[in-house]
Image (tube, rainbow, N blue to C red):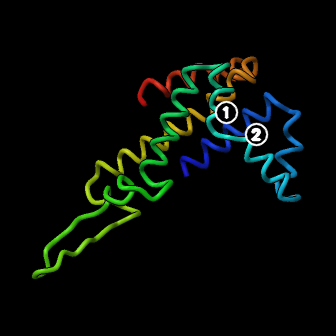
Amino acid sequence: MNRVVLENALYGFFLARKPELRETWLKRHDDYASLREVRRVFKIADMLEALRAVDVTEANAANELYQRAIDYSAHPNERALTQGMRDEMAGEEVRFDTNHLFPKGAAALELCYKATAQTGVCALAMYRPLMRERYDMLDLTGRLDHLKKGL
């Protein structure tokens, strides 16, 4: 879910900065050429670069959180698989048990909670450069800065 939140925030940020691409994005499923164009234009790395041009700190945070989301479950890989896995001998056989939703040990679950909070704050902070006056008026700037200190 953290990956989805970050991707949605990046798409929103990118489309706010490049309104001429909104129609391209909306026509993704019209035909194969449209799908190819969306895949060409809407790359996570490019959207992160667009954010980096406006706010390096948030772009770095978004990139780190995005890579972490991929490493720890958004894609099948060693880290995603083994964080909740344990092995035990059953005679001459080795048995592997895995718990995908609640890995053994509180550390993995605590890290998940923290990553979710970091992702939420990062997603909200991405829009600050686009809506600085509104963020300041509602004191969202101060609140986000305060939340970041503990994350």
Q: Mark 2 is on which residue type? A: Val
Residue closer to the observer: 33 or 92: 33
Earlier residue among tags 2 and 1: 2
Q: Which residue is mark 1?
A: 46
* Residue 131 sits in quarter: top right
* Residue 30 sits in quarter: bottom right
Q: Mark 1 is on which residue type? A: Asp
Residue closer to the observer: 99 or 136: 99
Element marked by disc 2:
helix
Q: Which residue is mark 2?
A: 41
Element marked by disc 1:
helix
User: Is 18 left, or right, of 112 in this rendering?
Assistant: right
- 14, above or below 87, in the image: above
Q: Position of residue 15 (x, y in %)?
A: 79, 35
The residue depicted at 62 percent of the width and 35 percent of the height is: 45
Total numbered circles: 2
- 2, above or below 132, in the image: below
The residue depicted at 73 percent of the width and 47 percent of the height is: 39
